[in-house]
Amino acid sequence: MKEVYLSVVIPTYNRLSTLKIVLDWFGFQTLVSDQFEVIVVDSSSTDGTEEFMQQLKPNYCLRYIRQENKGRPGARNRGVQEASGEIVVFSDSDIIPEKNFLEKHFLFHQNNRNAAAVGWESRINSLGELEEARRSPDKRFRIHKPAGKKLSWLYFLTGNASVSKRKLMEVGLFDETFQGYGFEDLELGYRLWKSGVKIMYLPEALNYHLHPRTLENQYEVQKMAGKNAVYFYRKHKDWRIRWFLGMSPPAFFWYSLLRKLPFLLHYFEEKAESRSTFFREVMVQYHYLLGVKEAWKK
C-alpha cells in the first residue's frame, strides 16, 4: 500500500450527486498528490455510487470501500482503520474542499504534535452560492476563536477536522451506538480532549457544506440529535455535557411553556414557516428538546 501523510475519510450513503463534485475538487488540491489519499466508505448506497466509483480514475490516490450500513460512525471507523496516513482528515460526501484545504491541514500537523485541527466549514445552499462564497470569503466568515487558539471539544465537528490515527485508535474511535444525526463527533472530541489532545482552530482550512434542508427535515434531525445528546450525557455523566448541549433548566422551562400553551406553539410554528430566522431557531430547539425528553423517559 502506498505510504502517504494524510488520509481523508469520507462516509457516504446515497449522496452520489454531491460526491461527484467533492471528489472532482480533491483533484485540484495544492498539496502534492503523493502526500494524501481519499478513502470513500460507502454504507451500501443504492443510487449508483458503486458503479461510479469503480470507473473513476482521478489524479490522486482514491480508495473505495463498500460495507453494510453501520451509520456514519461505522463508516468513519472503517475509514480510519484502513487509513495508511499518519494523520486522518475527516470530511463528508457533501462538503467541497477549497484548493488549499489539505495543504493547510498538512502544515498544521507538521508544526503541532498531540493536537487536533478543526477547520472552517462554510454552509452553502447551491453551487452558485459556492462561487459567490469563494469570491468574497470574508463576508461569510464567522470566526469563533482566533486562528491557532484552543477550542473546547464542543467544536470537534468532523465535517472539517484532522487528528493523528494513533490518537484515534488510542481513545477508541467513534461510538457506533450513535445513529442518525448528532454528537458522535463531539463525543469523540470529548474523549480526545480528556486524553490530553489540544483541539485548535484552523480557519485557513476551508470547505463548503452543500446541504440545503427543508424546515421539516431540520426538525427531524434535531429530534434525533436530542436523543443522541441524552446518550452522550449518560455515557460520561459530566455536568458540562448536559449544560453545553442545552439540557439545562432554562431550556426545559421554555420547552414546558410551549407545551402548555398550544396557541403560542402554533404561533411560533407559523412564524417559523414564514422564514423568520428567530422563530426558526426557537422551533428547531423545541424539536431538539422533544428528542431529549423522549430519550430521557427511557
Image: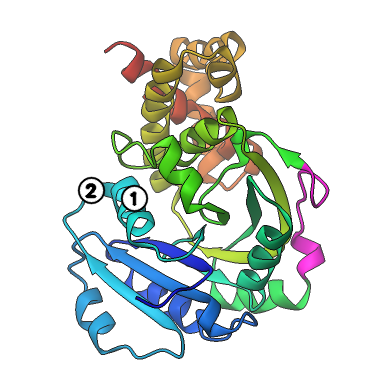
Relative placement, left or right, of 288 versus 104 is left
Q: On the image, which quarter does residue 170 sit in?
A: top left
Residue, x 34% and y 46% (percent of image)?
73
Can you say which quadrant of the picture contains the N terminus?
bottom left
Q: Residue 237 location in percent, x, y?
A: 47, 13
Relative placement, left or right, of 74 versus 119 is left
Q: Crowdedness of circle 1 by 10 Å Cα count: few (<14), some, many (20+)?
A: many
Front-lying residue, 38 or 139: 38
73 in the magenta segment = no
- What's under tag 1, amino acid-wise? Asn
Q: Which residues are magenta?
A: 137-149
Mark 2 lies on residue: 70
Main structural element of the magenta stretch: helix, strand or loop? loop
Q: Is residue 29 visible?
A: yes
Figure check: 114 above or below 256: below
Distance from the alpha carbon under mark 1 to that under mark 2: 10 Å
| For the residues bearing labels 1 and 2, Cβ distance under 8 angstroms | yes
Q: Residue 208 location in percent, x, y?
A: 59, 66
- What's under tag 2, amino acid-wise? Lys
**Dot 1: what SS?**
helix
Relative placement, left or right, of 77 versus 262 is left
Q: Residue 271 location in percent, x, y?
A: 56, 38
Relative placement, left or right, of 203 versus 9 is right
Front-lying residue, 266 or 216: 216
Figure check: 283 above or below 4: above
Mark 1 lies on residue: 77
Front-lying residue, 221 or 107: 107
Residue, x 35% and y 13% (percent of image)?
296
Of callouts 1 and 2, the N-terminal one? 2
Residue, x 51% and y 51% (percent of image)?
158
